[in-house]
Image: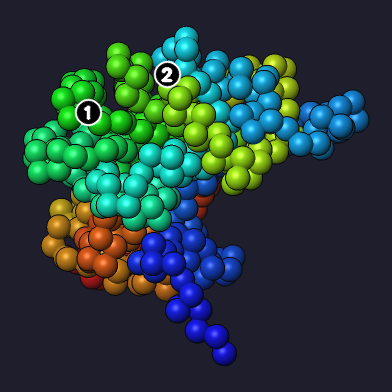
Amino acid sequence: MINYEEYFADRVKPMKGSAIREMFKRMADPEIISLAGGNPASELFPADELSKIAGKILMTSPTVALQYGTTDGYPKMKDCAIARAKEAGAYNEGDGVLIMTGANQGIDLTAKAIINKGDKIIVESPSFIGSLNAFRTYECELVGVDVEADGMDISKLEEALKANPDAKLLYTIPTFQNPTGTTMSLKKRKKVLELASEYDLLIMEDNPYGDLRFAGADLPTLKSLDTEGRVVYCGSFSKILSPGMRLGYVIGPPKLLEKVEMLKQVNDVHTPMLTQMMCVQFMKKYDINKYIAKNRKLYKEKCDTMISAMEEYFPKGKVEWTVPEGGIFLWCTCPTITDVSVVVNKALEKKVAIVPGSNFAIDQSLPSNKFRLNFSSASKSDITEAIKRLGEVLTEIL
């Protein structure tokens, strides 16, 4: 038999699969309650509306919907992306926009366009594994900066930049960060931009959760504060409409996006026309902000349910957690242990799935005493039951 390990490219040999995806394979058991993934609430999907829209498109415009499209995106879909970005202050006249097959494609292809082997990339620690793995495939060096309750630790960011003055890119999820659920303060946002200017860094702002604020006041995006054209902004329709439609977008300097567009042409030619047209018609026919308001209301209820259950069932003084103002995640720390994997495995025995913190680390081989919980996907009753079971595990171990 062929030993395929010998054929793998050097750049992919160190990569490890997402523990979340691996866990899904073990969750065929319908009794398992998952707090592991990052799925939006499926009960919110506008299935009836989208079904009617898709049927009408295929009846009236089948050639456009089923034929090749342009790589940069269906023009009306680009208008929708620009409209969403403008609401976040993330679009300026003269910016380029590309429609992507999910925001992660935008992150990956933008990274591919600018990262050389050996380049240094500043990232939050912990951070989203999809982006970290995208960066790893281009054989760069990831430099982690700790995340505090109000975003990146600025003093450590300054230390990292002094130690790595040749760093090329800073990647951040400033609003409802994945995995911690934290939000970068306005003061820190301004400081990040100042440091980026001082050290001549590009910034990639990933904002898939920004529309899902259910507490606190809105904060300006980094893109809206940028006066030098340093910020590349990645947005998504996955969390406000449907992840299965695979619709994201990148907004940034046209010269950079020209290269990204060429890479997308090689990657998948274009994002499916049908889903782009469906999104356009949904946005035209329905008030997307009313739909987003429904998301916010439900996610607040689910987050409150989870935190109330944690307060009741987790061992007192043994677990710390973040309290997000939006998004779909919160982050737990067990200060008295060094490796949470035993908790993860014991929880799975009790039919509850959670994700260990090591999955979001720069060095995934190191043990972690943290884990991520998702509150958007499960029902409120399942959230309470899952936290009760998890509390039993934590009480036993801690």
Give the position of the N terminus as an image quadrant. bottom right
* Picture coordinates of residue 277, whole percent (x, y): 73, 28
Nearer the viewer's eye, disc 1 or disc 2?
Answer: 1
Q: Residue at x 48, y 66 (%)?
A: 22
* Picture coordinates of residue 26, whole percent (x, y): 51, 70
Amino acid type at image mark 2:
Ala
* Picture coordinates of residue 50, whole percent (x, y): 74, 32
Task: Tell me how far mark 1 sits from mark 2, CA to CA.
Answer: 20 Å
Left or right, 323 with reference to 63: left
Q: Tell me where residue 273 sits by quadrant.
A: top right
Q: Residue at x 47, y 22 (%)?
A: 254
Q: Residue at x 30, y 69 (%)?
A: 341
Mark 1 / mark 2, whichever is N-terminal: 2
Asked if residue 238 can be seen in this view, the reply is no
Residue on which the image places disc 1: 200
Give the position of the C terminus as an image quadrant. bottom left
Secondary element type, mark 1: loop
Asked if residue 281 can be seen in this view, the reply is yes
The label shown at residue 93 is none
* Picture coordinates of residue 65, whole percent (x, y): 80, 33
- In the image, residue 63 sits, relative to residue 123, either above or below, namely above
In this view, the residue in front, 218 or 145, is: 145
In this view, the residue in front, 181 or 261, is: 261
Residue on which the image places disc 2: 90
Secondary element type, mark 2: loop
Q: Residue at x 42, y 73 (%)?
A: 349
